Image (tube, rainbow, N blue to C red):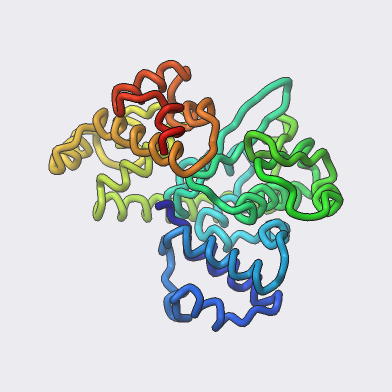
Amino acid sequence: MPKIALDTLRSLLNHLALKGIEKEAMLAHLGMTKSSLNVSGELIDIRLYESLYAFAERHLDSKTIGFELGQNIEPDRWGTLGYIAFTSPSIKEALACQRRYQSLVGNMGTPLQEISNNKLILKWLPSYACSHNTVEEIITGWTAMARKLSNKKIKPIGIYFGHECQSDMRVYEDFYDCEVRFSCDYHGIKIYQDTINQPFNRHDPEVHALLCQHADSLLNRLAERRPVESVTKFITNQLPFGVPEIEDAAQNLHVSVRTLQRKLGEYDITFSGLIDSIRKELALSYLRNTNTKIVYITQMLGFSEQSAFQRAFKRWTGKTPRQYRNNE
């Protein structure tokens, strides 16, 4: 089951407390204590996060909690990665850092980029059957961050959601100030391609560099303690952009290729075998737990063509992806 940063849960708790829900009641619902919220860098089961959204919906009788939370984006919501994004020089650099350090804040979904006619579509493909609140929080948070850091020079030209509209459409159109469509085949935001280089107003080169060094050290410590988990996270985050080489993984973990091969060998694992295993497990999970179209799953797993994914899946299971999904 995917995980999410405790920092993100803490942000939602604080938002809901401002809405009038007693924090003690929320913690009791989650089976947590105040002291358990103070563990830095901790990842938790995504089901706790979704459970809190459902709890809040019942208490507030509202379907727009995630949408409202996304509008008030602050860097602490995503821990170290949030501060790295806010001090980045541009969206382009922020997205690159997101790919590199995503594993520090969980694995609840995968961002994909598509360019067409000088427009960039940034899609978010969830790795589980998430709620509309989570989707709207993410898409709205991207929008709010881009506006805040570019002095409103970066504006969306299209917003797309895979779920049905949960409230008054005008509320969404007023905030996004562009075309908003629901019941699409993906969640995403469309912007002009050249705006990804628009300078951010909070860019601080020294602070940004220090934050990236800190994030690298966190990845390194994780690699020392749990090397297979670290490599797995790296491969999972890189697959949407292409199948990584072992040299890429070694560089990411700041070890030599030989050292990485030795560490994996201690668990009787090869790098190529690990990639194949990860692709299989992700494919099964996406088909079981999401309605993501097979063409997008193909992209998320780093296959160049859908036919290549079909052949691999048939090798893994003896079935086509569609047959597997229909039988689940």
Q: Is residue 79 above or below residue 227?
A: below
Position of residue 177 measured from the top left corner of the image (x, y, whole percent): 84, 45
Left/right of residue 67 with respect to residue 77 in the rendered view: right
Left/right of residue 292 with respect to residue 259 in the rendered view: right
Q: In this view, does 270 lie above or below 147?
A: above
At x 24%, y 30%, the residue is 273
Position of residue 130 measured from the top left corner of the image (x, y, whole percent): 55, 51
Q: Is residue 254 above or below residue 307?
A: below
Task: Tell which residue pokes out farthest to the front in this image.
Answer: 327
Q: Which of the 4 image quarters holds residue 54?
A: bottom right
At x 54%, y 69%, the residue is 10
Position of residue 218 measured from the top left corner of the image (x, y, whole percent): 37, 55
At x 26%, y 45%, the residue is 228
Q: Which of 307 and 75 is in front in this view?
A: 307
Q: Which of the 4 image quarters holds residue 234?
A: top left
Position of residue 86 measured from the top left corner of the image (x, y, whole percent): 62, 53
Q: Which of the 4 image quarters holds residue 67?
A: bottom right
Quadrant into which the C terminus falls: top left
Left/right of residue 122 with respect to residue 254 in the rendered view: right
Q: Is residue 54 above or below residue 193?
A: below
At x 82%, y 38%, the residue is 179
